[in-house]
């Protein structure tokens, strides 16, 4: 007991001291750059959390590594863009992004994954196949151009802030949305009846089925919500940056790394992982431009080396 | 050059096996002479194993480049053999080790980059330049560094199992892709390295289609027979044991983790050779050589061919390269991904053992039909 506490202390010191030294140096060197990088990191983390939370939700319950998650992100973004372009209503676009991706997710679960319960590897291979086909269909339909959204003016300005002086309002909005979604997910999983069933299913799927719950329906709902979150994030992220082919891989990688670092199947883990990865990416970009990705990789290596199940992952038998 | 690597990898496996035997089975001494005695009978058994179809296939691949034009020899034959070799490393890892790694293409990509960085290549963007070492030295360095990378990937991913392995190797592979793309000082950024040519050795220019084909064929055959041998050697037998029941193998005294990492290293060597062949095939290396698409292509090749037998990798590679080159005739060229994705999806959905599974299914059906008609004739007469 004592030795483990000592080890933890050494661990904190080993990570914390260089980190604190860096922070002090960076603030002294250029406070504005440091704080704007910090804000960028946190808002990027918010976006990553939105994408990864759906991924981890699906994985936690169904043990299904949905490698088509990035494609769902892109799909929701494109459909949202069409609607936004046609109606000039950005909020409608966000809603449609969620619903369209949720429908695709529901379709996948009902028509394919339902029939390969427990065959994890095969499900994963199928999702890879689906992601390839979907990516190419979307490239066919939408071409290689870059699309960008036209969100309401009120959230597309910049607001004055302390130290950083001005900061894009939209990024703050993304952060707010992520917090709201996070709280809503927490409420959904911990307080609602379906959430209770999902949590029970994560713990023991067979026992849940035995106690009279229609497990297939719970699975379908979870898959739809998880996929819908990807589509939702697609519109939100597409408005912050832009939509183009290849974004699917980028956000798939982000969700993978976030979930590996944070712990698979844990929403809180996804939040912690997203924060770490978002910050690492932005600080890497600002302070060591061509090696930025190395930091992400290093975090993953360190976590895997010392906590193979992720920071907040549960040890499974 | 790589034989030493292989031998070392095998020896560690074999000695561990022998050690395990002596500790678990005291009668190890009687086993060793029995194995030594059987050397002649083993060769006889090996010859007895050769079927007409084996000789037919071997002859076909040997005379193939002389029968077709240089496009088929180089673009189809050479590329299929090089890709097949990389896919073989995945078949070995996934089919026999139970570890589906998507990073095999990244290992090959590291090898390609190392050949370009240490060997002779054209000037790259952003100040990265190759060191201009002789080709054989560059290849050796590439072998060492890329195998070390493969071992690192293995060391990281053996901490996890099954689907987690796919996720982690995918994350590692995509990270490498982004690193190569962002980094201009070493990897030459978005453009990578151009003008990486295969060497001329003893007057044979390996840039020519037919010499390249034979070079690729040599390494493909070497890889194939090496894997065939390894699977029957103690190392491979133990590996399949580890795949099927790691806990029991652990109880038997095997170091399961070390065995898995060693498997990654061995598979890495195959992928490295494939990577060197690929850079000489393309004459260039860029982040796209190890992109997500290429990583998935290797998975598609291995799964489409079938992971139950090493030949599946090459079978899948031939089909893949043919589709890649002739998708233009089926549907627009840009839609190649759609064709190959749909083919992959239908294989995964309907024939989990790939083309080999289809083959054995239809063979079984035909044999059963034959037997049925035979009994019917016998019954009727």
Image (spheres, helix red, strand yellow):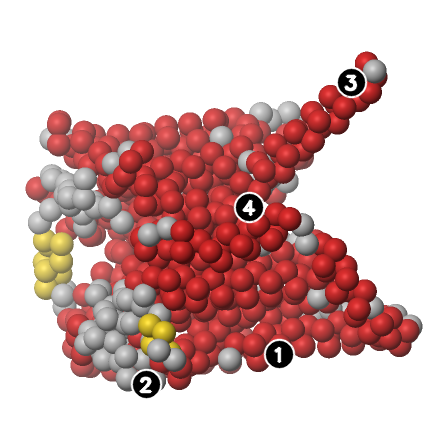
The reply to the same-chain question for discs 2 and 4 is: yes
Q: Nearer the viewer, mark 3 or mark 1?
A: 3
- Between discs 2 and 4, the one toward the N terminus: 2
- Between discs 4 and 3, the one toward the N terminus: 4
Query: Label 3, label 2: how many angstroms apart (C-alpha)?
Result: 71 Å
- Between discs 3 and 2, the one toward the N terminus: 2
Crowd rating for badge 2 (residues with CA inside 10 Å; few <14, some 14–19, many 20+): some
Chain to which mark 1 belongs? B
Q: Give whichever of B344, A95 is nearer the camera.
A: B344
Horizontal arrangement in the rendering, residue B251 relative to residue B303 (left or right): right
The answer to whether mark 3 and mark 2 are in CB contact below 8 A is no
Query: Residue B306 — which label?
Result: 4
The reply to the same-chain question for discs 3 and 1 is: yes
Q: Residue B235: tell me if it is visible.
A: yes
Write down the residue under mark 2. Answer: B133
Write down the residue under mark 3. Answer: B376
- Between discs 1 and 2, the one toward the N terminus: 1
Spot occupied by residue B323 in the image (x, y as percentages of width and height): 37, 42
Q: Residue at x 49, y 30 (%)?
A: A112
Query: Residue B8 — which label?
Result: 1
Give residue A118's quadrant in the image: top right
Chain to which mark 3 belongs? B
Q: Secondary structure at mark 1?
A: helix
Q: Nearer the viewer, mark 4 or mark 3?
A: 3
């Amino acid at each position: 007991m004592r030795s483990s506490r000592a080890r933890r202390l050494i661990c904190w010191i080993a990570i914390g001291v260089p980190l604190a030294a860096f922070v002090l140096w960076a603030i002294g060197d250029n406070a504005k750059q440091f704080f704007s990088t910090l804000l960028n990191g946190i808002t990027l983390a918010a976006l990553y959390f939105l994408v990864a939370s759906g991924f981890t939700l699906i994985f936690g319950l169904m043990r299904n590594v949905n490698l088509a998650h990035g494609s769902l992100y892109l799909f929701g973004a494109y459909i949202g863009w069409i609607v936004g372009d046609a109606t000039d209503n950005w909020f409608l676009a966000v809603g449609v992004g969620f619903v369209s991706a949720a429908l695709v997710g529901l379709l996948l679960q009902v028509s394919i994954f339902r029939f390969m319960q427990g065959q994890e590897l095969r499900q994963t291979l199928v999702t890879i196949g689906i992601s390839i086909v979907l990516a190419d269909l979307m490239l066919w339909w939408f071409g290689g151009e870059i699309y960008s959204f036209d969100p309401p003016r009120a959230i597309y300005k910049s607001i004055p802030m302390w130290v950083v002086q001005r900061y894009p309002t939209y990024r703050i909005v993304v952060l707010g949305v992520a917090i709201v979604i996070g709280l809503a997910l927490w409420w959904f999983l911990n307080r609602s009846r379906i959430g209770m069933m999902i949590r029970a299913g994560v713990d023991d799927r067979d026992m849940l089925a035995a106690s009279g719950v229609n497990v297939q329906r719970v699975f379908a709902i979870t898959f739809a919500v998880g996929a819908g979150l990807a589509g939702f994030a697609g519109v939100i992220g597409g408005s912050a940056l832009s939509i183009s082919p290849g974004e699917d891989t980028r956000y798939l990688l982000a969700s993978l790394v976030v979930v590996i670092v944070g712990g698979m199947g844990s929403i809180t883990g996804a939040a912690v992982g997203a924060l770490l990865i978002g910050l690492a990416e932005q600080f890497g970009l600002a302070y060591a431009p061509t090696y930025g990705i190395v930091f992400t990789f290093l975090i993953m290596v360190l976590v895997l080396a010392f906590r193979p199940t992720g920071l907040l992952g549960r040890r499974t038998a | 050059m790589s034989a030493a690597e292989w031998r070392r990898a095998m020896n560690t496996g074999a000695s561990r096996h022998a050690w395990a035997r002596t500790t678990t089975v005291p009668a190890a001494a009687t086993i060793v002479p029995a194995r030594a005695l059987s050397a002649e009978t083993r060769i006889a058994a090996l010859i007895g194993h050769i079927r007409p179809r084996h000789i037919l296939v071997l002859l076909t691949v040997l005379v193939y480049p002389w029968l077709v034009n240089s496009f088929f020899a180089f673009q189809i034959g050479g590329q299929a053999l090089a890709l097949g070799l990389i896919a073989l490393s995945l078949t070995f890892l996934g089919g026999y080790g139970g570890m589906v790694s998507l990073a095999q293409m990244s290992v090959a990509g590291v090898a390609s980059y190392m050949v370009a960085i240490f060997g002779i290549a054209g000037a790259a963007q952003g100040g990265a330049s190759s060191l201009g070492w002789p080709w054989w030295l560059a290849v050796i360095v590439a072998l060492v560094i890329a195998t070390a990378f493969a071992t690192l990937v293995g060391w990281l991913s053996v901490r996890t199992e099954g689907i987690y392995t796919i996720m982690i190797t995918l994350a590692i592979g995509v990270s490498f892709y982004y690193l190569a793309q962002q980094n201009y000082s070493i990897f030459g950024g978005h453009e990578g390295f151009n003008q990486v040519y295969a060497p001329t050795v003893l007057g044979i220019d390996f840039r020519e289609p037919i010499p390249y084909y034979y070079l690729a064929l040599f390494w493909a055959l070497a890889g194939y027979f090496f894997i065939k041998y390894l699977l029957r050697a103690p190392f491979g037998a133990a590996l399949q044991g580890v795949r099927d029941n790691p806990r029991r193998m652990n109880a038997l005294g095997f170091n399961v983790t070390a065995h898995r990492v060693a498997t990654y290293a061995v598979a890495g060597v195959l992928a490295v050779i494939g990577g060197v062949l690929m850079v000489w095939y393309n004459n260039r290396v860029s982040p796209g050589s190890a992109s997500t698409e290429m990583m998935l292509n290797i998975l598609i090749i291995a799964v489409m061919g079938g992971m139950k037998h090493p030949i599946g990798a090459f079978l899948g590679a031939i089909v893949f390269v043919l589709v890649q080159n002739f998708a233009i005739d089926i549907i627009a060229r840009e839609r190649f991904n759609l064709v190959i994705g749909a083919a992959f999806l239908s294989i995964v959905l309907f024939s989990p053992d790939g083309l080999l599974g289809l083959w054995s299914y239809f063979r079984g059906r035909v044999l059963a039909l034959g037997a049925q008609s035979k009994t019917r004739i016998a019954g009727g007469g």
